[in-house]
Amino acid sequence: MKQIIIIGGGAAGFFCAANLDEKKYKITILEQNSDVLQKVKISGGGRCNVTHACFDPRELVQFYPRGNKELLSVFTKFQPGDTMEWFENRKVSLKIENDNRAFPESNSSQTIINTFLNEIQQKNVEVKTKCSVKEIEKQDQKYLVKTSLGDFEADFIIYTTGSSPKSLKMIQNLGHKIIDLVPSLFTFNIKDPLLKDLAGTSFEMAETSIPKLKTEESGPLLITHWGLSGPAILKISAWEAINLAKVKYSFEIEVNFISKDIDEAEELFQNFKQSNPKKTIGQSKIFEVTNRFWQRILEVSNINLNKQVAQISGKEMQIILENLCKKKFNVTGKSTFKDEFVTAGGVDLKEINFKNMSSKLLPNFYIAGEVLNIDAVTGGFNFQACWSEAWLIAQDLNNFKLK
């Protein structure tokens, strides 16, 4: 019986094992940590954001700053609808939330983990934890995998290690080119009087732009203890991951907290002024922001909160609107977004055959997951790439004509 060694017990490795034909192969998963599926466990705040309800591959690839061209063919073969069906067939109900993210009905990542563990148990897949791979040697038709638990011989290798520098070095030693790793999906560290002590304040729709990079994104925004987060920030961090690393995470960002241009905002303000002249500005609900945030805007604009709306001068109104719609912040660093650390960089995509995720350089060697130079914005997309790539590998091996 031919031996498949899967290096890495994460999302891609397990999904691949769960779809392989156990009658054809002996399958072993090697995982260096004491627990498998660690990222699945913590994803989505412990609920596991399994995928995203976007069922058109052409639309789906728009969420991948790196890998979008290559993934188009992959997603035409296995996309989020197939993922959902795969879980439904195993009695795992998924629900689609308002923002199109898909989670297990149970709201627990353990449901997903148990499903995988159950699948591989039925297939008699051997899982070796605390098994650190030191080196992979190519030997004639086979591979020798040297580990902390001894040597393993493999006819096929599936490399799903995630993006640790050590695992990238190992595959580089086998001849693959590695694109340098940089963080993707991170929050921006900002110290500014406008944000001080307002952690937890959120905005349903904001616009963010980095003028220097001529880039902009929109979406929900969140003030944190360190600065700014939320999709409007995370999307820009993913698309500009490489450029932001080059400027060492020190740059200027412009934020429009209300997603209205200044002229439109001014019109709303003038209308409010006419219909509520006697109201104090501090208690006026002109825009869709929290009272605390509105009062902070007035403070940093040097406006007396007790002033009547009618007495706000044209100049004062402009200062308020500038702070609301065109506020510039100096970003001085980054923070990891929760525990869902994602990196840009990894194995060069030119060296991968995306029909089956095989290496173009190494025979009988497949690569999937975050070890590749593929990453996505937040929302279940990184997992979907893992599921789709792993499924392709399993299909290729299941249809492989063994000599």
Image (cartoon, rainbow, N blue to C red):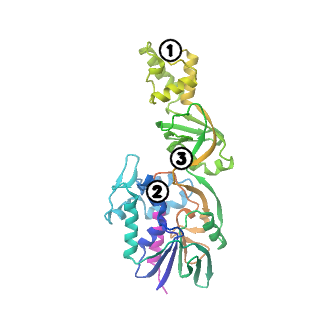
Crowding at mark 3 (Cα within 10 Å: few <14, some 14-19, many 20+): many
Q: Amino acid at mark 2?
A: Ile
Q: Report x, y in % for residue 358.
A: 54, 72
Callout 2: helix, strand or loop? helix
Disc ID at residue 235? 3
Q: Which residues are magenta?
A: 382-403
Residue 364 versus residue 374 in the image, above or below: below
Among numbered discs 1 and 3, the one appearing first in the sequence = 3
Q: Is residue 393 magenta?
A: yes
Among numbered discs 3 and 2, the one appearing first in the sequence = 2
**Which residue position is annotated with label 2?**
42
**Which residue position is annotated with label 1?**
307
Q: Is residue 254 left or right of residue 45?
A: right
Q: Look at the numbered discs 3 and 2 and tell me whether their residues touch, using CB distance below 8 Å.
A: no
x 44%, y 30%: residue: 288
Among numbered discs 1 and 2, the one appearing first in the sequence = 2
